[in-house]
């Protein structure tokens, strides 16, 4: 193949490989074995389409603990609090259980709640409602 023909194919190859570049997934530890995973938002931008995951020795970071994208998450020593993405924003509480595997973690997710019921349940689980959202995510 001549150099001229190779130079003509180079733009085509760049266009085709560009389809595979772009959005990258990232994982961020929230607390203990709880992580969020989503699309890298870029330089100083929030993660996009974030899902809650649990890391355990058997499965690593497998599928999401529940099938809703998150807009906010926070935590205390006893629980994680989560707000799902619009248009149907709902609150969830994940009780943190020492020594849990992913199935125990999944079974200890409470909700969905509206804001009033969420605050009532948070006080039962955490002993107060002082937990605040500390992570914010963008949604596509």
Image (spheres, rainbow, N blue to C red):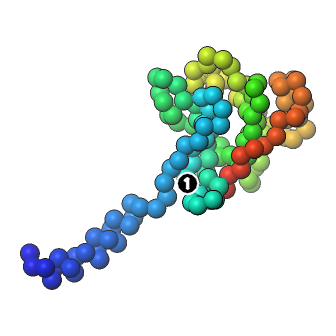
Q: What residue is at 72 percent from the left and 42 percent from the top?
A: 73
The residue at the far left in this view is 1
Residue 59: x percent and y percent? 47, 27
Q: Secondary structure at mark 1?
A: loop
Say which of 52 and 41 sits in front.
41
Give the left or right position of residue 85, taking residue 102 as reference. right
Residue found at x 61% / y 52%: 47
Q: Quadrant of residue 14?
A: bottom left
Residue at position x 70%, y 24% in the image: 96
Residue at x 57%, y 48% (from the top left corner): 38
Q: Nearer the viewer, residue 138 or 140?
A: 138
Report crowding for label 1: few under 14, some 14 to 19, many 20 or more residues within 10 A (C-alpha): some
Q: Position of residue 77 (x, y in %)?
A: 75, 26
> Residue reaching furthest front?
44
* Residue 47 in sight: yes
Residue 32 at x, y = what percent? 63, 28
Quadrant where the C terminus sits is bottom right
Query: Of 131 and 16, which appears nearest the observer?
Result: 131
Eyeballing the image, is 96 above or below 41?
above
Residue 5 appears in which quarter of the rendering? bottom left
Please, is residue 55 above or below residue 8 in the view? above
In the displayed structure, does residue 93 sit left or right of residue 140?
right
Mark 1 — residue? 40
Where does the N terminus fall, quadrant-wise? bottom left
The relative height of residue 19 versus residue 38 in the rendered view (above or below) is below
Q: Is residue 130 left or right of residue 62?
A: right
Q: Is 82 above or below relative to 47?
A: above
């Amino acid at each position: 193949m001549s150099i001229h023909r190779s130079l003509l194919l180079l733009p085509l190859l760049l266009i085709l490989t560009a389809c595979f570049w772009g959005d990258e997934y990232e994982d961020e530890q929230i607390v203990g074995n709880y992580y969020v995973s989503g699309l890298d938002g870029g330089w100083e931008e929030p993660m996009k389409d974030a899902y809650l995951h649990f890391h355990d020795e058997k499965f690593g970071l497998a599928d999401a603990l529940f099938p809703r994208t998150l807009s906010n998450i926070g935590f205390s020593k006893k629980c994680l609090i989560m707000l799902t993405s619009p248009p149907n924003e709902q609150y969830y509480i994940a009780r943190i259980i020492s020594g849990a595997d992913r199935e125990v973690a999944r079974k200890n997710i409470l909700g969905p709640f509206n804001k009033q019921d969420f605050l009532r349940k948070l006080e039962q689980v955490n002993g107060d409602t002082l937990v605040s959202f500390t992570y914010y995510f963008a949604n596509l």
